[in-house]
Image (cartoon, grey):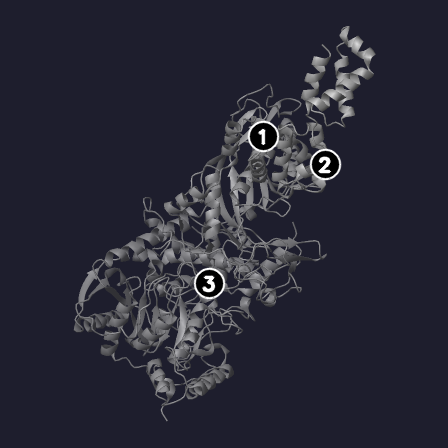
């Protein structure tokens, strides 16, 4: 299946990546060839196969309910491109 | 004076312990090489001043503790290093200074090593030629305009060119083994869960694994020992005893059974790779190993499966790069515009392609056809290996379907680039350990590697077999330092 | 379904111009798990801290950070599941729900999609028209998001991640609720169960309990459900009720006008008392759920479930049955007394040494009045259970009358003294000495010879007058029963 420009626009919205028309043209070709490649799987019947849930043979390990971290606001905000002393700052959300 | 940068780390450790030379002398030699290596573009961040201070401190204290006393090591720039810029080869993480140290690098430092620098790699480890890095292409010391492989291209190049005595990389679909093969070095991807992923920039969580790149099998055993171990901070890390891989290293591999999978004899494979494979088989026979033909019937589906699973996980793992908490941020009139501009400007083309593919295969209406299907095939691929390991102790294959190629050769055709990982990807999908060891040269005098795949958590077995091969291969890295 | 017990009938319908409509309601309650640290990180969950001070490297989604699950949160969910008489799923999976928002640092929320930790269960409601069973569809664990603050700056939004990663239980009901009253009873019952279990404090002001409300309408008699709207994130029972009423009427009007109801997400505007569409673009709905590859499937040992079963306290339904059976109180009384664990604890403390019926009356009457007036919980009652039981015993043993008891109780509210001491010091003990009482009565009858004559001539109403005079003369302390007896014999 090839992947049309509308679909690319839709998924780029979902992925929050803005693309201009030229980029969309290029991507349409690349992504279509990749999709064609991965669709080789369709040759294989997997109706009775259960999907892999984890690659290691173990079950989830637990952590104790303890407070070990916190009060590191300076560290948390350190790398933020825009911040106040207390908060991360982002442009207004438009609903 | 002998050139210390030619030494293996095993020899460097012994030399430092015996006071044949100092950590400072070792460090200075590597810094000298690294400072004259700009054409290779292997380093993103050089920590030479700090490394010299660490070396001097080490020499002053005069205590040789740990597995890696006084050894300077440069690492792939996917490992978060405290107060040292960590970029994952991406513009979007430009100027990111972690306040924490990854578990794996921390383990190296606890064994007495210290950081020499951060090495270039494909952006977010997505690539097989180190041509997707925001910080530029890395060159293979085996030839100008030749790629070092990827994504740990900077690591492989720096190691082969004696810019670091050893290094660590990450391997999601072959990112350690393929560049090792392209640069005549040893690269090992451990069993999934053997090394902690905590503090490593994530690409595809169910496939990523850190591992060593070294000059020799002995070095590989040593470094693997140092970096392995259970980490309660990583839920997928496995609580299993770590062997002393070095002390247990032996070339006595008599009577082991090695499988040769017929599906790895792919079309268009250069005859010299086929020859090399046969040479490997002969050498193993010489070591007393029993050779057995096996079948891994779903091999042909591994790459398509990988190119669903890895981008799907990546599309979600890379959602955190949104310009809010760290890294690059572009302007935008509202939150959504800011996101879209930041991610459009911050990510390179290959990363965008993979995020979009990953988003697509997970999106409503396509999940079952792509993602779920891929997880089913992944199970079949794993079961192929499980069955094979009922009859054999390890599997021998070529590491790559070709030797290192020219820059730009495959850059515009993503699928032909992906095909490079055809022999390495199944191993990641099945979570198995595998090693690539240098085995010979092609007609252009470019190195080629063979891959040994082992049972889960049996890295020792493939290390031992590699040692037996290494002795018989007598591989020499013939590199002239043309870049100086 | 509803079983009619009394003449009280279920009667919540929307009477449109053309038809009578039934309202179908389902709730997705988000209950904050009572735990010290977050679901996947070890930072604190405490309410009200300085912004971004309860944030770990994991909570702010720094590169390379990984989730590790909090065992206690798993146990809390299992306990809650057991309290809802639900199936505990021994195998469950954590999935990523992918979307971008300023207060969602990872770009995804870790939640449970296809395989939740708890399956189907039930909650029993006591309505005036009978008991009603509300089905529980599922309970799953998920991470809370941070907080976006929009009103501190005209151009920017400020983000506080203190809540980011706190464990929530999402409890999804079946569409079994039919009125705002039932929603009220349901949320209160659910909260009560979780408080009994100490798995959620149910504090709605602090956001520990909030709900998404699904509302649809159908003509009475129809079987098929109508199109539903989801009203997001309502944080008080009153608002839930108001939102439902508004939304049901809105839908009825649309349908009677021949228009269709759009399946959409709406918000309740608490200033205008209206719901409004969130107008989410279509693509915003595609959450691309997939199993979180940083985590393994959650496998729960049967032994853990058995262990937790043994620690379960007596829950409201069982407690109510026991109260009715053992303490011989009415269903109405029992319901009120078990509605909060603290109330039932208080009651059981009082009746250790006091009459069960009187104790119920005093708690539900005088004590509740005081608590309501002072707006405090019974746990902080100014009158201790011990002293209330002493007071009740003074009444039972006829040492003081009910009237005097109320007087003593007023004093106890101000200062939680032993009522015996109050009675002694104020001289309020009941006058029960027949000789003393006879003296008073004789005196009164002598003073009112004319009325005695009238009484004897058949004006029996005057008996009350004599009693009143005796009580007045004794300062209210005379034992009314004895006064009664003595008067009757004197007036023969």
Q: Can residue C118 be seen in this snapshot?
A: yes
Foreground tag (3 vs 1): 1
Secondary structure beneath label 2: helix
Q: Distance between the Cα atoms at labels 3 and 2?
A: 67 Å
Q: Is residue C263 visible?
A: no
Q: Which residue is mark 2?
A: C410
Question: Is the residue marked by circle 3 packed among few (<14), some (14-19), or many (20+) residues within 10 Å?
Answer: many
Residues at marks 2 and 1, common chain? yes
Specify whether disc 3 shares its chain with disc 2: no
Mark 2, Cα crowd under 10 Å, few <14 / some 14-19 / many 20+, is some
Q: Position of residue B128 (x, y in %)?
A: 40, 68
Residue B308 on image: x %, y %: 41, 55
Tag 3, which chain?
B
Secondary structure found at label 3: loop
Q: Locate residue B226 relative to residue C466 in the image: left or right.
A: left
Calculate the distance from the C-alpha at mark 2 to the C-alpha at mark 1. Answer: 20 Å
Tell which of B94 and C4 is nearer to you: C4
Residue C368, labelled with which disc? none
Q: Earlier in the sequence, mark 2 or mark 1?
A: 1
Residue at horizontal 67 percent and vertical 21 percent from the top: C481
Chain of the residue on which disc 1 is drawn: C
> On residue C355, which mark appears?
1
Relative to C70, is C268 on the left or the right? right
Report the residue marked by disc 3.
B202
Residue extending farthest to the bottom is B1
Residue A45, position as x, y percentages in the image: 32, 46
Residue C372 vertical placement versus C141 (above, below):
above
Chain of the residue that carries numbered disc 2 in the rendered image: C
């Amino acid at each position: 299946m090839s992947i049309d420009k509308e679909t690319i626009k839709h998924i780029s919205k979902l992925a929050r990546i803005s693309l201009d028309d030229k980029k969309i043209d290029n991507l349409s070709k690349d992504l279509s060839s990749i999709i064609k490649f991965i669709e080789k799987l369709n040759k294989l019947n997997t109706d009775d196969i259960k999907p892999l849930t984890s690659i290691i043979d173990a079950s989830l390990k637990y952590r104790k309910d303890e407070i070990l971290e916190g009060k590191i606001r300076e560290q948390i905000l350190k790398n933020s491109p825009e911040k106040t002393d207390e908060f991360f700052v982002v442009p207004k959300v438009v609903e | 004076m002998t050139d210390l940068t030619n030494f293996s780390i095993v020899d460097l450790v012994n030399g430092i312990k015996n006071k044949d030379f100092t950590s400072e002398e070792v460090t200075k030699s590597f810094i000298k090489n690294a400072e004259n290596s700009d054409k290779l573009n292997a380093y993103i961040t050089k920590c030479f001043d700090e490394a010299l201070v660490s070396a001097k401190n080490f020499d002053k204290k005069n205590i040789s503790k740990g597995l890696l006393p006084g050894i300077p090591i440069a690492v792939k720039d996917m490992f978060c290093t405290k107060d040292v810029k960590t970029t994952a080869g991406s513009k979007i993480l430009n100027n990111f200074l972690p306040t924490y140290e990854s578990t794996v690098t921390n383990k190296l430092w606890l064994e007495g090593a210290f950081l020499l620098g951060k090495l270039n790699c494909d952006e977010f480890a997505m690539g097989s030629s180190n041509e997707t890095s925001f910080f530029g292409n890395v060159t293979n010391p085996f030839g100008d305009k030749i790629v070092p492989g990827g994504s740990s291209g900077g690591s492989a190049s720096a190691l082969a060119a004696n810019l670091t005595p050893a290094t660590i990389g990450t391997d999601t679909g072959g990112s350690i083994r393929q560049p090792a093969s392209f640069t005549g070095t040893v690269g090992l991807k451990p069993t999934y869960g053997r090394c902690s992923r905590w503090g490593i920039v994530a690409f595809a969580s169910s496939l990523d694994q850190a591992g060593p790149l070294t000059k020799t099998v002995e070095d590989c055993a040593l470094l693997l020992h140092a970096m392995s171990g259970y980490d309660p901070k990583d839920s997928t890390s496995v609580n299993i005893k770590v062997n002393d891989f070095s002390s247990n290293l032996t070339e006595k591999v008599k009577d082991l059974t090695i499988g040769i999978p017929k599906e790895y004899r792919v079309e268009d494979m250069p005859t010299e790779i086929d020859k090399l494979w046969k040479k490997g088989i002969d050498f193993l026979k010489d070591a007393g190993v029993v050779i057995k033909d096996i079948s891994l019937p779903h091999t042909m589906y591994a790459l398509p499966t990988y190119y669903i699973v890895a981008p799907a996980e990546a599309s979600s793992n890379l959602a955190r790069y949104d310009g809010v908490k760290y890294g690059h941020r572009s302007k935008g009139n509202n939150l959504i515009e800011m996101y879209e501009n930041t991610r459009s400007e911050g990510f390179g083309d290959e990363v965008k392609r993979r995020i979009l593919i990953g988003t697509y295969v997970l999106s409503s209406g396509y999940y079952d056809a792509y993602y779920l299907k891929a997880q089913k095939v992944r199970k079949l691929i794993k079961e192929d290996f499980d069955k094979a390991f009922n009859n054999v102790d390890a599997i021998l294959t070529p590491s790559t379907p070709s030797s290192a190629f020219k820059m730009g050769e495959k850059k515009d055709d993503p699928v032909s680039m992906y095909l490079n990982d055809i022999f390495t990807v199944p191993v990641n999908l099945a979570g198995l350990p595998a090693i690539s060891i240098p085995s010979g040269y092609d007609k252009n005098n470019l190195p080629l590697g063979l891959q040994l795949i082992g049972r889960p958590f049996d890295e020792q077995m493939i290390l031992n077999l590699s040692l037996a091969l290494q002795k018989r291969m007598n591989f020499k890295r013939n590199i002239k330092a043309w870049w100086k | 379904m509803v079983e009619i017990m009394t003449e009280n009938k279920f009667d919540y319908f929307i009477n449109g111009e053309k038809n009578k409509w039934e309202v179908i309601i389902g709730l997705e309650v988000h209950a904050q798990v009572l735990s010290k640290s977050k679901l996947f990180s070890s930072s604190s969950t405490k309410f009200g801290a300085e912004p971004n001070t309860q944030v770990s490297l994991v909570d702010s989604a720094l590169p390379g950070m990984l989730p590790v699950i909090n065992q206690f949160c798993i146990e809390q969910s299992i306990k809650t599941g057991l309290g809802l008489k639900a199936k505990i799923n021994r195998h469950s999976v954590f999935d990523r729900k992918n979307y971008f928002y300023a207060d969602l640092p990872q770009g995804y929320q870790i939640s449970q999609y296809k395989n939740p930790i708890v399956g189907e269960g039930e909650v029993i409601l006591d309505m005036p028209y009978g008991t009603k069973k509300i089905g529980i569809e599922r309970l799953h664990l998920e991470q809370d998001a941070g907080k976006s603050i929009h009103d501190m700056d005209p151009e920017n939004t400020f983000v506080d991640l203190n809540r980011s990663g706190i464990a929530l239980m999402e409890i999804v009901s079946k569409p079994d609720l039919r009125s705002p009253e039932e929603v009220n009873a349901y949320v209160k019952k659910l909260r009560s169960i979780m408080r009994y279990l100490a798995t959620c404090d149910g504090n709605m002001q602090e956001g520990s309990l909030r709900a998404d409300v699904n509302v649809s309408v159908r003509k009475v008699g129809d079987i098929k459900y109508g199109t539903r709207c989801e009203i997001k994130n309502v944080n008080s029972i009153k608002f839930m009720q108001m939102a439902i009423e508004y939304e049901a009427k809105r839908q009825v009007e649309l349908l009677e006008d021949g228009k269709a109801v759009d399946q959409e997400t709406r918000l309740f505007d608490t200033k205008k008392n209206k719901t409004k569409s969130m107008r989410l673009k279509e693509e915003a709905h595609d959450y691309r759920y997939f199993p979180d590859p940083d985590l393994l499937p959650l496998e729960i040992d049967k032994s853990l479930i058995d262990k937790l079963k043994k620690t379960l306290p007596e829950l409201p339904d069982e407690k109510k049955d026991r109260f009715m059976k053992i303490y011989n109180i009415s269903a109405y009384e029992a319901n009120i007394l078990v509605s909060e664990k603290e109330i039932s604890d208080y009651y059981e403390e009082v009746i250790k040494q006091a009459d069960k019926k009187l104790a119920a009356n005093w708690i539900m009457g005088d004590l509740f009045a005081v608590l309501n007036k002072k707006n405090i919980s019974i746990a902080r009652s100014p009158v201790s259970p011990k002293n209330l039981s002493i007071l009740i015993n003074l009444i039972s043993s006829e040492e003081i009358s009910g009237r005097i008891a109320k007087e003593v109780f007023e004093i106890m509210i101000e200062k939680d003294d032993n009522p015996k001491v109050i009675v002694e010091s104020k001289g309020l003990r009941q006058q029960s000495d027949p000789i003393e009482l006879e003296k008073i009565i004789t005196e009164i009858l002598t003073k009112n010879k004319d009325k005695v004559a009238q009484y004897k001539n058949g004006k029996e109403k005057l008996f009350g007058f004599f009693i009143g005079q005796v009580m007045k003369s004794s300062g209210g302390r005379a034992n009314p029963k004895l006064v009664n007896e003595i008067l009757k014999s004197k007036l023969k």
